[in-house]
Image (cartoon, rainbow, N blue to C red):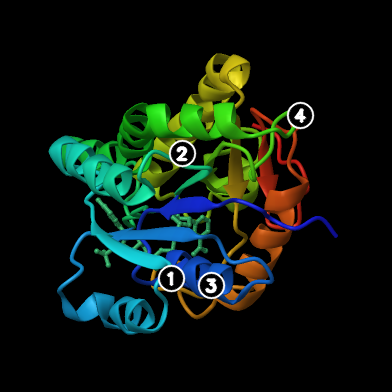
Amino acid sequence: MAALRARAVLLTGSNRGIGLELVKQLLGGPRPPAWIFATCRDPEGPRAQELRDLVSRHPNLVLVKLDVADPSAIINAVKIVEGKLNGAGLNLLINNAGICAPVTLETVDSEEMIRAYKTNAVGPLLMAQAFLPLLKKAARESTDKGLSCSKAAIINISTIMGSIEKTSESFFKPVISYRCSKAALNMLTKCQALTYEETGILCVALHPGWVKTDMGTQEADLTADTSVRGLLSVLPILSEKHSGSLLNWEGKAIPW
Ligand code: NDP
């Protein structure tokens, strides 16, 4: 099986759930990246304790404060990452941070819609804009042909709940603001793929499955371990033929 050879990886929302598990498995993988930038909203707070413990044992893991709903925090994070990379590029940006509120068409309001869009769609858009120079640098530095996650990639962690075609299968959970914001993230992924292809950057949306996390609840099908093992086995096989599509944690295509 192909291995992920990304030298520098950045993840959002990495203090718990799928993000934290991605950090753990990247650190424990056969070829750990030289740099893993694990970002979260409150690196000093109680919810980042596990991440801080990992940082104390892994010199290649850097904890960076980042709220994806705060444009100035994104700019600050770029400066920190740039400093650490010392002239090198960023290979892989994983936009994982997300929020989901249990709202229906009856109960949702404009504040909740805007909150969901800011985190789930606008955040990933601004992250890609801000980290684009570092991603382009990684693409230029690479001798690999075609597009890949080892070269330069934006992975947007989306959901099947954002698929318009699949809505009727899961509409027993309306989560209106979540669905609409993730559908926007899916559209963003396609637009990014079309725009960034010529600069050598792969853009894919991945659905991690229904996962036992605070968001997914303990009723979910998959453990974070299984989901992330799947996601990390999909990343190395992604190429230009997948750019601009939505795939699940097993690499199967999901219709928009
Ligand atoms: P969790 O609720 O367990 O974790 C969410 C993470 O996102 C936390 O680290 C949280 O940080 C962070 N976060 C939320 N808002 C922001 C923000 N504004 N800036 C930075 N970080 C933020 O969710 P999961 O781990 O389950 O979900 C991860 C991703 O996977 C999400 O994008 C979600 O939509 C997607 N997904 C999950 C599924 C599931 O079944 N679990 C199914 C399909 C998709 P904090 O601790 O500070 O709140």
Q: Earlier in the sequence, mark 1 or mark 4?
A: 1
**Which residue does the numbered mark 2 point to in the structure image?**
89
Cα gap from disc 1 to disc 4, whole angstroms? 31 Å
Asked whether residue 106 appears in the rendered view, the answer is no
Crowd class of label 1 (few under 14; some 14 to 19; many from 20; radius 10 Å): many
**Which residue does the numbered mark 4 point to in the structure image?**
145
Q: Quadrant of the C terminus?
A: top right
Q: Secondary structure at mark 4?
A: loop
Report the amino acid beneath label 3.
Leu
In front: 224, or 234? Answer: 234
Report the amino acid beneath label 2.
Gly
In front: 18, or 30? Answer: 30
In front: 219, or 94? Answer: 94
Residue at 65% in and 66% down: 31
Q: Earlier in the sequence, mark 2 or mark 1?
A: 1
Q: Is mark 1 within 8 Å of ligand 1?
A: yes
